[in-house]
Amino acid sequence: MFIRDMFVKPIDRDIKGVIKVGQADDENIRQELEEYVVTRELQKHFADFFGSYKKGINGHTDKMGVWISGFFGSGKSHFLKILSYLLENKEVN
């Protein structure tokens, strides 16, 4: 058995190293969303964010803000980009 046989998707497929928010086409967005791995910790962060977001929508608050912190390379920007896709609610094929 080869290592590549352990993966569901071809490991030699085109993967964009950097895709900036606002500069991605539907295919790249779809691939990013499809391949984003939501761990238990990320699931908690998404739930916390959307819980606070809902409070901001349902009532007036001047205490709305989000702080994303983590070590270099821990996925802060990627998390924020995925969150922006979800908030945009754009349909991609």
Image: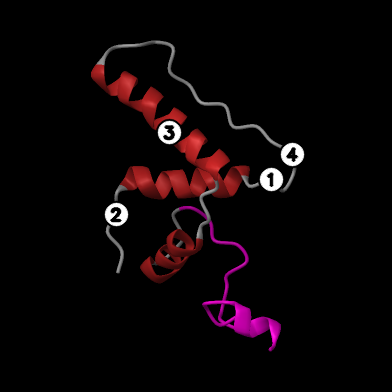
Which comes sooner in the sequence, label 3 or label 4? 3
Mark 4 residue crowding within 10 angstroms, few (<14) / some (14–19) / many (20+):
few
Circle 3 is placed at which residue position?
Answer: 47
Q: Which residue sits furthest front?
A: 1
Residue 32 against residue 87 in the figure, above or below: below
> What stretch of residues is rendered in magenta?
1-21
Q: Are marks 1 and 4 in contact (CB under 8 Å)?
A: yes
Q: Position of residue 46 (x, y in %)?
A: 46, 37
Element type at mark 1: loop
Residue 55 against residue 74 in the figure, above or below: above
Circle 2 is placed at which residue position?
Answer: 90
Q: Quadrant of the N terminus?
A: bottom right
Q: Quadrant of the C terminus?
A: bottom left
Q: Position of residue 79 (x, y in %)?
A: 54, 45
**Residue 44 shown in magenta:** no
Circle 1 is placed at which residue position?
Answer: 74
Instruction: Depth check: give the residue in front, 48 or 87.
Output: 48
Q: Quadrant of residue 4?
A: bottom right
Which comes sooner in the sequence, label 3 or label 2? 3
Mark 3 residue crowding within 10 angstroms, few (<14) / some (14–19) / many (20+):
few
Which comes sooner in the sequence, label 2 or label 4? 4
Element type at mark 3: helix
Q: Quadrant of residue 76?
A: top right
Q: CA distance from mark 2 to mark 1?
A: 26 Å
Q: Are marks 2 and 4 in contact (CB under 8 Å)?
A: no
Looking at the rendered structure, which numbered label has been put on residue 84?
none
